[in-house]
Structures are given as structure tokens and as C-alpha cells.
Amino acid sequence: MQHILRTKITFLLAGVFIFSSSLFAQLRESINLPDHDDKPYHFGINLGFNKSHFSFDHHPRFLQYDTVNVVESINSSGLNLAWLVSFRLSDHFNIRTYPLNLTFTEKAFEYNLKYLEFGERNPVVKKIQSISLALPVQLQFTSDRINNFKVYTIAGARAEYDLAANAGARKTENLIKLKKFDFSVEAGVGFHFYFPVFVLTPELKVGWGFSDLHSRDVNLKFSNVISHINSRMISFSLTVE
């Protein structure tokens, strides 16, 4: 059985290698979409995967009381779905934005409590789901095109509105209240691969939030030990133009 499995894996890897070799050979042999970069604007569909967490500060109450022994932010995964619009400024500079940009995340805090209520068990994890509408504006600097390949870097700012934020909720005894608006800066790197009928763009990007998202409530044990909360995110996406 293991011999058959090894044989199948060998054939699969060989097939992937042959396909990749032929694909890159095709990209080297002919210039695809030669007039693509001369157009004044481009549109694309973007699908991405993100890892996010909260950067936070302990409140002085954390040292004054011993209800919460430890609090940590946990990395969580999510998805991005966006519509890209890119405007050409020059041969090497573009302005990009995403008029429709949905981000789905689920961040979490992990607590170690000294006094557990009925049904609780350490560590206590409090998940915070988020569905955000974002409007980023980015400046893109691109290299010269080499056959059917180009590399670029981006930098910009992003305004975000969280549809699932619970700062105004009343029954939040076991939650952390977060505000709806966030502002962040972004930076990243990406690659354009030119195919006969489309351009495929993988991109890696990081974001740092500057807004304090925490709507602190002194009466909530999961909230009163935390002072400021800022968002952090790293994402990998694929865009088809």
C-alpha cells in the first residue's frame, strides 16, 4: 500500500513539475497582453487569506487585582474579498483602491482566571468575530516588465467600519466591547504574471491599526484589565485582472 502511495505521489509531483516547466516556458517565449500596462485603469477581483490579532496594553487594574492572572491575544484566520480598481499615473506608479472590500476575521483573547465561575475552565477564550467594510488607498510602485513578469511594492492607508462591532451592545457581560471604526496603514509586495487573457497577481501585505478599538467597561472583568487595543493583520491574496 505504501509503495502504491509513493508511486502516486511521485507521478503527481512529476506532473506538477512538467506543468510548471511548460507554463513558465510559455511565459518566457511570448509577450502576453503587451498593451495591458498602458491602459489608464484596470479592474480586478481579489480573494485573500489573512492572519490577524490584537496588539494591546494592560490596564493598571491588571496589577492591582488578581482576578485575571494572564491575558493574551490569539492569532486567528480569516478571508478577504474585494474588487480592485487601479489608476495609472506613470510607467512605474499607480493609485489603487478597493471600492468593495469585505474582510472576515475572528480574533480572540485568552484568559487565565484565578476565580472560575460555574462551567468555566482555564484557559478561558473569548472570540470576537468581525465583518468589516474597508476603503484602502494605496500607492503602487512597479518595476520594469521582464517578459511576462513584474514585481511591485505598495504603501497606503485604510479606513474600516466593523459591521459586527459590539460597543453599543447592552448584554456584554462575557464579552469585550469594540468600536466600529478603525484606521490603519498598509505595506506589501506583489508580483504580476501575464497570461494570454488575464494577469494573475499574488500579494503579501501587512497592516497596522492606529485607532484604539477598545470601548472599556470597568464593570466587566474581561474588559477592565485591558487598556488600548489595536489591530494587526498580515494577508496573502490573489488578484485576477
Image (cartoon, grey):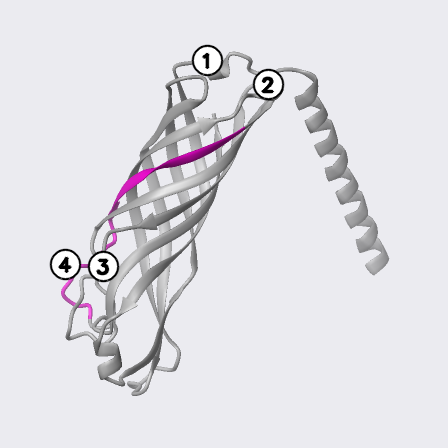
The residue carrying pointer 2 sits among few (fewer than 14), some (14 to 19) or many (20 or more) residues within 10 Å by Cα, namely: few
Residue drawn at 77 percent across, 49 percent down: 9
> Who comes first in sequence, dot 4 or dot 1?
1
Name the residue tied to disc 3: 178
Residue drawn at 82 percent across, 60 percent down: 2
Q: Position of residue 181 (x, y in %)?
A: 21, 48
Mark pair 3, 1: CA separation: 44 Å
Helix, strand or loop under label 3:
loop
> Who comes first in sequence, dot 4 or dot 2?
4
Residue drawn at 48 percent across, 17 percent down: 37
> Who comes first in sequence, dot 3 or dot 1?
1
> Who comes first in sequence, dot 2 or dot 1?
1
Q: Which mark is residue 168?
A: 4
> Who comes first in sequence, dot 4 or dot 3?
4
Q: Nearer the viewer, residue 160 or 186?
A: 186
| Residue at the extreme right of the image, as rendered | 3
Name the residue tied to disc 2: 196
**Which amino acid does the dot numbered 2 rest on?**
Pro
Name the residue tied to disc 1: 38
**Which amino acid does the dot numbered 4 rest on?**
Gly
Q: Position of residue 143 (x, y in %)?
A: 52, 25
Helix, strand or loop under label 4:
loop
Q: Is residue 85 left or right of residue 11?
A: left
